[in-house]
Amino acid sequence: MSLSPTLRVLLKGIFFASFSACLGGTTFVFTRMIMPQTDAATLSFLRYGIVGIILFFFCARSVLSISPSRNDLIGIMFIGLGMFAIFPFFMAYGLSYTTASRAGLLYATMPLATITIASLFRVEQANLMKVFSVFLAMIGIAVAMSTKLTPDNLILLKGDLMVMVGVLGAAVFTVFSGKYMEKYGNLPVMVFSAVSGVSVTFILSLFFGEPFNGSLSFDGFGWFAIFMLAVPGGALMMYSWGRALLIITPTQAAIALGFNPLTAMFLGFLLIAEEITIRFLAGFIMVVSAVVLSNISFSFLKVKYKKNRKILFFNY
């Protein structure tokens, strides 16, 4: 029995979205494993510097052929700090203290953080389903991460807070990048954003890290982890997500983001012996359910810009 052309296209798009989400899930584990060998600022600069070079290589003609206005260029580079500076720095910093599975679960709330920020800035109108989804995710996070306030657990909560700051940075980029991507294209905007973000993380590495005094002295596994973070977990992840959005809608693609924390959870269990509790699994189900429910709305991702633009959720 052959599949219909429509179903084949849908499955192809879901495959790319799911593949991208799984690659994203690996980054939490590899980041946690490599942090003892480096610092958050240096790792952010190195990882996204490589990603930026790869993206530029594949879209150099597009980047060099456009001339953004001064105001647009300032806007692109400013919001790029959220994606290429705030997100990677606080994510890596947080993973020095919290677990990969907890970080992956917090990252899974990024679409809901995007909805909240978009509503606050009147970029998108919230409806009852979205409000319910946000509260369900908050309850899920509380269930998964509630713990006794011991000194060790306070360290976990510190890491969780840092990760959430990074998620909010990525959400801000997601909300405000749409108008520039429609005007100049996805990859050129990502490259311009990377320039500003990577420049800031380089400066941060000079002040808060030691890139020239040990933070780049990786062992064999360390360089393998850098490769996994920058190539499969960076450029290939973004490329696959972009391919998915060319085939299916952001609504359909966003559902695949559930594979991100799922991959982080099981890889964390297999590679670094992170504990998976019944309480955490219950919270995980609630958070993923919240993301799925937020996609059910007919107006999901229909943004109230003057030109009725769409917010595109990016898998990082």
Image (cartoon, rainbow, N blue to C red):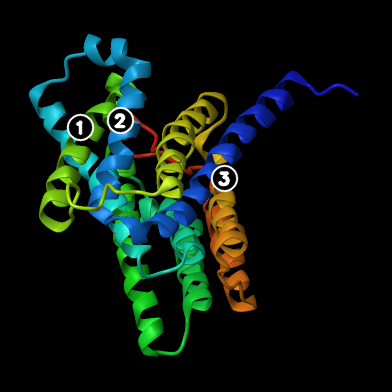
Q: Marks 2 and 1: CB-CB under 8 Å?
A: yes
- Ranked by sequence position, the earlier of labels 2 and 1 is 2
Q: Which residue is mark 3?
A: 22
Examine the rendered structure and indicate whether residue 241 appears above or below residue 27.
above
Residue name at image x 48 percent, y 62 percent: 100
Q: What's under tag 2, amino acid-wise? A: Gly
Where residue 200 sits: x, y (%)? 15, 44
Q: Is residue 301 at least partly visible in the picture?
A: no
* Nearer-N-terminus badge (1/3): 3
The answer to whether residue 112 is left or right of residue 23 is left
Query: Residue at position x 16%, y 38% from top?
Result: 199
| SS at circle 1 | helix
Mark 3 crowd level (few <14, some 14–19, many ≥20, 10 Å Cα): many
How much space separates mark 3 and mark 2, taking CA atoms?
Answer: 21 Å
Secondary structure of residue under mark 3 = helix
Circle nearer the N terminus (3, 2) = 3
Q: Is residue 116 above or below residue 146?
A: above
Instruction: Find residue 45 and report its image quarter.
Output: top left
The numbered mark at residue 247 is none
Q: Is 273 or 262 nearer to us in this picture? A: 273
Q: Which residue matches tag 2?
A: 52
Residue reaching furthest to the right: 1
Residue 162: give x, y in percent of width and height.
30, 65
Above or below, 158 relative to 254: below
The reply to whether discs 1 and 3 touch (Cβ–Cβ < 8 Å) is no
In the rendered view of the protein, which quadrant contains the C terminus? top left
In depth, the one of 106 and 152 nearer the eye is 152
What element does badge 2 sit on?
A: helix
Q: Which residue lies at the image location 36% right of the left edge and 31% below the top edge?
A: 309
- Decide: few, some or many residues near mark 1? Use Cα within 10 Å; few <14, some 14-19, many ≥20: some
Say which quadrant the N terminus sits in.
top right
Q: Which residue is mark 1?
A: 195
